[in-house]
Image: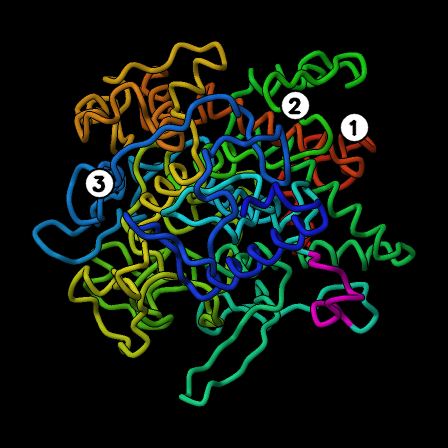
Amino acid sequence: MAVSGFPPKFRLIYRRRIQAELFLNLEQGTFMKTLPGKKNSSHGAVRGADFDRRSSQAEGRFGRIFRNLPAAEWPEEALRQLAGNGHDEGGMASDPELAEGTNLPFAPSEEGQASRLHDDEENSGIDSGYTYLGQFIDHDLTFDPASSLQKRNDVDALVDFRTPRFDLDCLYGRGPDDQPYMYDGRGRKFQLGRELLEGPNGAVIAHDLPRHRWVDPDGTVHNRALIGDKRNDENVIVSQLHSIFLQFHNRLADDNKHYSFSEIQRQVRWHYQYVVLYDFLYKVARRDIIESVLPHLASGRSIFEDKPRLLFYKPKNEAFMPVEFSVAAYRFGHSMVRPIYRLNTKLSGGNHPDDTRPNERERGIDGRQFIFAGLKQRGLNGFDEFPKEWGIDWNLFFDLSGDKDSRIGKDRTQPAYKIDTSLVNPLAFLAEFSKIDMSTPASPLTDIAQLQPKPLDKKEIPNLALRNLLRGMAMGLPSGQDVARAMGLEPLADDLLKVGKATNADEYDKLNALNTIDPSFSGKAPLWYYVLAEAQHDWRQNGGEEDTPVQLGPVGSRIVVETFVGLMLNDGHSLLRQAPAWHPAIGKGKAFDMPDFVNHALGN
């Protein structure tokens, strides 16, 4: 029976039951698939799965900006070809980077370089720390445990288990009264985890997340983080960034002893929102679009004299999370992930913190860790403790000292990768959906296959590009070209939609066009892919050189900027609503940015 046939009270009860069942399915790592000729079992089915995927309402917890545009569909095999598999050329999932003539992993060496940019995939405009700030922001805004990758999803039936506000509920959870184990005895400050060192025998430079440890009957040891959103323990970098936010709160609590918990919380939120609006957004989106949405930023007048102009994101009653943002445009950050990172300059080892093998040094991977890996000691895989020597020197991720351009070699601030239609090889083998080798001792890597974990089972989809493409189709997103036209823009021609890495202008021009992968993509590109291809095309139009910054294009910028600003304007507790002229009194004042935030948290 359709839920719409029930009275409102029973409709809500039914919806909550289905969401709870789906939440359990997702937690157990299972996904339901509609098979030809078979019906979904009631356990795990989404209300409205047999309905058209257009939202019947203008808003909900999840909703649509372009709700009248038709859903775009492609054969599943075409999406698989576009995603690639991390082994063959031609798809979005890149091949592994190998030392010449070998099957061994390779990374461009940092030694002896005269430039801050050492890799032609690096983005001169964005430091690598912003990749993980973007991930943190995503976890603050959205959590959708009820949708399935491979079946139709009715947006009206989905609930965002995060509030669609920049309110740091991923940090604070349900507060000290309901989750006291996250806080100290007075409930005013956060608990911190164990101390982390700068390499073997190094100084204490960071803190892990607080963790709960237990051992299964089979001897398996678990160390789960006690935080407001488990996803902020997905990898070692985002977990330590979450710890920075814990420390920032604690620093404000120490510096303002007369403040109540709620007053400290409000100050943390405002500093965070200030960074989101005036630092992060300007890094990733086009300035002209930011200042067309918030014209007072360009004019210097008040926000009441030059009022915000939202052309497309217009909630009628309360804010909603647009699926065009959460399922497509905001996933641009996946292309910014580097395959390998240096956490601190004192690490010299590869498989083990104090053990460097000659062949690792020659291949440029000594002292650096892969973002995900099949070997526990080589990847920054999350949801567990990691070596205490892996404390992050944040100057390697953000320009904390203001001398980024003069720092080279191991001391450099590592840039993010370019926003383009390519994801690094480790993202084709997501650790969460794969088997990790827990037993391999600290020994030299003999084959790239050691770094690539195997899927847990045939139902799992460890390839991030494929997950994004399937989810976009499951949510009934329109094509990128249709969204561009709805914005009054001329869509990019098929021959300008490229698939592959944005390294330099010559290599870009040689990339295959999207419709050569499958004719079903002609004039109809997946929205997530289109946002990446548009950024890549704009970079090429601006010269396509190594030092040419890469930002989102007009479609991607418009969706991201309007969603960010719209959510803040619809939140009566946000900075834009309560104190639009406010600016921090710490760091660089009106120029306050994420490096200031980190420095203050660390007591610098």
Above or below, 427 against 328 in this view is below
Specify start and end residues of the magenta stretch as a single range.
Answer: 172-184
CA separation, marks 2 and 3?
Answer: 36 Å
CA separation, marks 3 and 1?
Answer: 49 Å
Graded by Cα atoms within 10 Å as few (under 14), some (14 to 19) or many (20 or more), the crowding at tag 2 reads some
Does residue 487 show up magenta in the picture?
Answer: no
CA separation, marks 1 and 2?
Answer: 20 Å
Q: Disc 3 residue type?
A: Glu
Residue 265: percent from left, percent from top: 78, 51
Q: Is residue 236 visible?
A: no
Apparent side of residue 336 relative to residue 190 in the rendered image (left or right)? left
Apparent side of residue 393 relative to residue 268 in the rendered image (left or right)? left
Q: Read off the residue under disc 2.
A: 314
**Residue beneath the point at 39% across and 51% down:** 410
Q: Disc 1 residue type?
A: Pro
Q: Read off the residue under disc 3.
A: 77
Residue 187: percent from left, percent from top: 81, 67
Does residue 179 show up magenta in the picture?
Answer: yes
Q: Main structural element of the magenta stretch: helix, strand or loop? A: loop
Residue in front for this viewpoint, 411 or 84: 84
Q: Read off the residue under disc 1.
A: 580
Residue 550: percent from left, percent from top: 41, 27
**Residue beneath the point at 71% across and 11% down:** 299
Residue in front for this viewpoint, 34 or 572: 34
Q: Disc 2 residue type?
A: Lys
Apparent side of residue 581 relative to residue 13 in the rendered image (left or right)? right
Q: Given contact means CB atoms under 8 Å apart, are the residues at marks 3 and 1 in contact?
A: no
Above or below, 76 against 510 in this view is below
Q: How many marks?
A: 3
